[in-house]
Image (cartoon, helix red, strand yellow):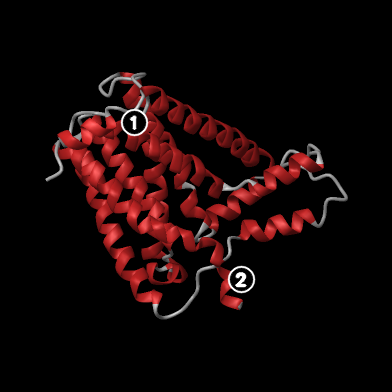
Amino acid sequence: MMEEIECKPPTQLIVEASINSTDHPEKNNSGEALSPSCSNILTKIHAGYFRVSLSLGCQALLWKILTQPNGVSRDVLHVFSKLPSTACLLLWCLAALTQISLTLVYALRCYFQFDLVKAEFSHHIGVNYLYAPWISWLALLQSAPILLQNSSLLYMILCWTFIVPLAMLDIKIYGQWFTTEKRFLSVMANPTSLISVIGNLVAARAAAQMGWKESAVCMWSLGMVHYLVLFVTLYQRLSGQNSLPTILRPTFFLFFAAPSMGSLAWNSITGTFD
């Protein structure tokens, strides 16, 4: 019981405390009073909600790839070519609207509830969800319906704008595995750590589309090596103990998401599924 409580993200504990203490209006870091309803929304919204826009963005990217002739067999192409282009456009618009809404709300959270954001950044589960916003933006950018050319200057600027935060999070997480005694990989690894793998692979695909083959191979290699290490580490834990809260058990599906994105990234690097 104690192990399950310790593994829950601190944001959930903070949410419960804030709900029980709504008699007085909260204040932001600059001392401005917030309404109880606004304070509750900003307290409940955390980086984990970006998994919604992440899944929608990856679906939009997948449908765009399937409707393109490159890298798809003729039989599969014949099936997906019958899909109306309006459906793919509506899916991308839904993903973009969800991502923009969550980004605006989370930006307000960063301003008014920075202490909660700092708690997420310091937590071994919450910090992995901080990859999700940047991955979602990269997926939306790559699945955009003929708005930007892969070789255009604006496309490159946007790609590197979203890739740089991913690289900084990699340095933070990977660095603590080697430098912090209580945050070794064998202790802190959990299924949500696979989100960082997906981030590296999405960044590799974006770099490959821009023509940066060396950078793409570097990011792809980093992501796949990280995936293998996490796979072995987490597989050894499955029969040993049940240290993952029930609410996080669906994250085991990330074991399939990471190699799937790795296949898409490798196709962009080499030009074919070899």
In the image, 229: left or right of 42? left
Is residue 161 visible in the rendered structure shown here?
Answer: yes
User: Which quadrant holds residue 78?
Assistant: top left
Residue positioned most to the right? 23
The percent position of residue 41, horizontal first and vertical second, equals 70, 43
Residue positioned most to the left? 274
* Distance Cα–Cα, label 2 vs label 1: 39 Å
Q: Which residue is mark 1?
A: 142
Q: Secondary structure at mark 1?
A: helix
- Mark number displayed over residue 5: 2
Quadrant assignment for the C terminus:
top left
| In the image, residue 128 above or below residue 61 | below
Report the residue at 41% width, 27% height from top: 87
Q: Residues within 10 Å of mark 1 (few under 14, many from 20)?
A: many
Report the residue at 44% width, 31% height from top: 91
Q: Amino acid under label 1? A: Gln
Q: Residues within 10 Å of mark 2 (few under 14, many from 20)?
A: few
User: Which quadrant holds residue 267?
Assistant: top left
The percent position of residue 16, horizontal first and vertical second, equals 73, 58
Q: Earlier in the sequence, mark 2 or mark 1?
A: 2
The percent position of residue 161, horizontal first and vertical second, equals 40, 32
Question: In front here: 30 or 98?
Answer: 98
Q: Amino acid under label 2? A: Ile
Q: Secondary structure at mark 2?
A: helix
The percent position of residue 1, horizontal first and vertical second, equals 61, 78
Question: In front here: 237 or 183?
Answer: 237
Is residue 72 visible in the rendered structure shown here?
Answer: no
| In the image, residue 48 above or below residue 139 | below
Report the residue at 45% width, 39% height from top: 56
